Image (tube, rainbow, N blue to C red):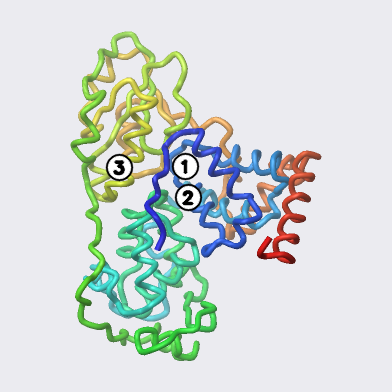
């Protein structure tokens, strides 16, 4: 279900992906807005900043904060905003559920091997493994099936998915899974054939034919759906690694002297343009990756970018590099909320800088995405009106879509 990502970790590839997301043809792809999910990998790792994404879409395509594509991309920024105010609270239930059901703490083998026998679920898992991407509705289907119908703890599912997504973001995934699980104060999210827009055939997808009321009853009871014995040829799950593959760390492993140098520490979420007039050292804090391991594809993506922009790459426990960093004149790094990295950089006395051009934060936790969006509309009025070039591009895009609909075979 799709080809491997093959995404180049470069600014050129990121900008190209950014512009492709606004093409009229995107609306007719099998998974609409999947290009936006690919774009998220560049945003998550700091190769692109959200503000420049919105500005380019505004200037070149005429999109504003009222457009669905901009709002889809902004959900990750909203979840980062919640993370900033709640801290590690996002990894726990935001609100207690009304029931006291017992949930499993592991992902069963039939799910890991895409052998559940449920037609909409198995193809999604295969796509996740093969490409590193899922459309956000596919994420919701998977999460609803795993949490409500198989009674697996949402945290376990979120971490499993995080490891395999190329653009996985801790806050975005954990809060999205909480929304599906119903631990954010909203009703749990459930799906059946009608709500998914599917027409299941045969016993393999029989659960989709349940009335929605029965799905709700299942979600609120200890019962789980029966699942078949593993099929003869299940999908093998790619391993999740707590350490970068050895073949990817042979270059730039020799650490330079930092004496009297201005040093910028480049972590996996700050892979933008190389800092000027500074010694750039890539850092990989292994305690974080032991807690949140990655697929080999994601390791290769991050390390390839680090090889491009760093003078050397340091791998280990950042808590043990104080003496080495003390040699430098100044040491600074882009601020990060990722646990382990944040604390270790603070202890080491590294100056934390916000990313240039970051979206303005309200300074208080917004109760909803709509509230966060209203703040941005006030704080960034330039993103509410498209310039003439953008308006023309938007008109051409609309005309192309109408022509294609009228003459699909042209």
Residue 149 versus residue 211 in the image, above or below: above
Separation of residues labelled 3 and 2 (CA atoms)? 16 Å
Q: Name the residue under label 2.
A: 38
Q: Where is residue 325 in the image (x, y as percent from the top left)?
A: 28, 20
Decide if residue 97 is on the left or right side of residue 404.
left
Residue 299 numbered mark, or none: 3
Report helix, strand or loop for mark 1.
Answer: helix
Q: Where is residue 31 in the image (x, y as percent from the top left)?
A: 52, 63
Decide if residue 116 is on the left or right side of residue 136.
left
Image quadrant in which the C terminus is located = bottom right
Residue 42 numbered mark, or none: 1
Image quadrant in which the N terminus is located = bottom left
At horizontal 50% and vertical 83% (from top left) the residue drawn is 199
Q: In the rendered structure, are the residues bearing label 1 and label 2 in contact, judged by CB atoms less than 8 Å apart?
A: yes
Q: Which residue lies furthest to the top in this view?
A: 260
Residue 228 versus residue 311 in the image, above or below: below
Return the residue nearer the eye: 147 or 89: 147
Return the residue nearer the eye: 352 or 395: 395
């Amino acid at each position: 279900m799709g080809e491997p990502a093959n995404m180049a970790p470069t600014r050129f590839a990121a900008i190209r992906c950014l512009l492709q997301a606004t093409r009229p043809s995107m609306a007719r792809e099998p998974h609409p807005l999947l290009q936006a999910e690919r774009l998220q990998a560049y945003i998550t790792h700091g190769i692109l900043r959200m503000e420049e994404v919105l500005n380019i879409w505004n200037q070149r395509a005429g999109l504003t904060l009222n457009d669905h594509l901009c709002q889809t991309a902004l959900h990750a920024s909203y979840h980062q905003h919640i993370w900033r105010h709640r801290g590690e609270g996002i990894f726990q239930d935001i609100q207690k559920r009304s029931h006291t059901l017992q949930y499993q703490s592991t992902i069963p083998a039939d799910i890991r091997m895409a052998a559940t026998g449920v037609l909409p679920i198995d193809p999604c898992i295969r796509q996740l493994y093969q490409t590193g991407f899922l459309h956000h509705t596919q994420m919701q289907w998977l999460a609803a099936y795993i949490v409500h119908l198989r009674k697996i703890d949402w945290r376990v599912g979120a971490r499993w998915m995080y490891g395999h997504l190329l653009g996985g973001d801790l806050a975005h995934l954990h809060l999205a899974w909480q929304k599906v699980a119903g631990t954010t104060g909203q009703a749990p999210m459930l799906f059946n054939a009608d709500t998914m827009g599917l027409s299941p055939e045969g016993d393999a997808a029989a659960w989709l034919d349940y009335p929605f009321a029965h799905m709700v009853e299942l979600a609120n009871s200890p019962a789980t759906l029966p699942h078949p014995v593993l099929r003869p040829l299940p999908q093998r799950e790619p391993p999740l690694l707590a350490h970068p593959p050895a073949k990817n760390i042979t270059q730039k492993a020799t650490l330079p002297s930092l004496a009297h140098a201005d040093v910028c520490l480049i972590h996996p979420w700050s892979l933008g343009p190389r800092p000027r007039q500074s010694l750039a050292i890539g850092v990989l804090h292994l305690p974080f990756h032991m807690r949140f391991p990655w697929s080999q594809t994601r390791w290769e993506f991050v390390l390839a970018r680090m090889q491009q922009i760093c003078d050397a790459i340091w791998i280990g426990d950042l808590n043990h590099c104080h003496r080495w960093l003390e040699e430098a004149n100044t040491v600074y790094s882009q601020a990060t909320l990722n646990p382990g990295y944040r604390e270790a950089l603070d202890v080491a006395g590294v100056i934390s800088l916000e990313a240039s051009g970051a979206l303005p934060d309200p300074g208080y936790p917004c109760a909803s995405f709509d509230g966060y969006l209203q703040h941005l509309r006030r704080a960034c009025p330039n993103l509410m009106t498209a310039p003439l070039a953008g308006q023309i591009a938007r008109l051409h895009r609309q005309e192309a879509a109408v022509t294609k609909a009228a003459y699909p075979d042209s």
